Image (tube, rainbow, N blue to C red):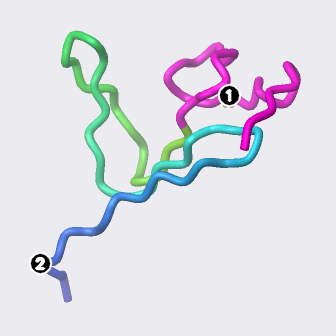
Amino acid sequence: MASDVPREVTIKVRENGPYKVTGPIRLVDRDGTEIPLEGDDVALCRCGGSGTKPFCDRSHRTIGFTAD
Ligand code: FES
């Protein structure tokens, strides 16, 4: 049975890693063009080192990114 209650969006800051976004979101670029997502979970880069921005490609591990 489907629920009429929208799922909440949660943004979790991963220690030394990305923003983990869970829930029904719409991601758009600076021009407003929608960036296709697979599923409701996405990891967004916050280290600046990703080769697939805005997504995390785990480069934070190799560049030694640290942040709480
Ligand atoms: S946070 Fe993972 S590549 Fe930047």
Question: Which residue is situated farthest in the front direction here?
Answer: 68
Q: Which residue type does callout 1 highlight?
A: Asp
State the SS at label 1. loop
Q: Position of residue 41 (x, y in %)?
A: 47, 52
Q: Position of residue 51 (x, y in %)?
A: 64, 13
Using a 10 Å C-alpha cutoff, classify the residue at mark 1 as few (fewer than 14 neighbours), some (14 to 19) or many (20 or more): some
For residue 13, the mark is: none
Q: Main secondary structure of the magenta part?
A: loop
State the SS at label 2. loop
Looking at the picture, does residue 21 appear above or below residue 29? below
Looking at the picture, does residue 35 appear above or below residue 42? above
Asked which quadrant contains residue 23, the reply is: bottom left
Q: Position of residue 66 (x, y in %)?
A: 80, 32
In which quadrant is the C terminus drawn? top right
Q: Which residues are magenta?
A: 44-68
For residue 28, side relative to residue 66 (left or right): left
- Quick check: is the Cβ at mark 1 less than 8 Å away from ligand 1? yes
Looking at the picture, does residue 2 appear above or below residue 12? below
For residue 2, side relative to residue 10 (left or right): left
Can you identify the residue that label 1 sits on? 57
Can you identify the residue that label 2 sits on? 4
Q: Quadrant of ligand 1?
A: top right
- Residue positioned 53% across, 18% down in the render: 53
Using a 10 Å C-alpha cutoff, classify the residue at mark 2 as few (fewer than 14 neighbours), some (14 to 19) or many (20 or more): few
Question: Which residue is situated farthest in the left direction here?
Answer: 4
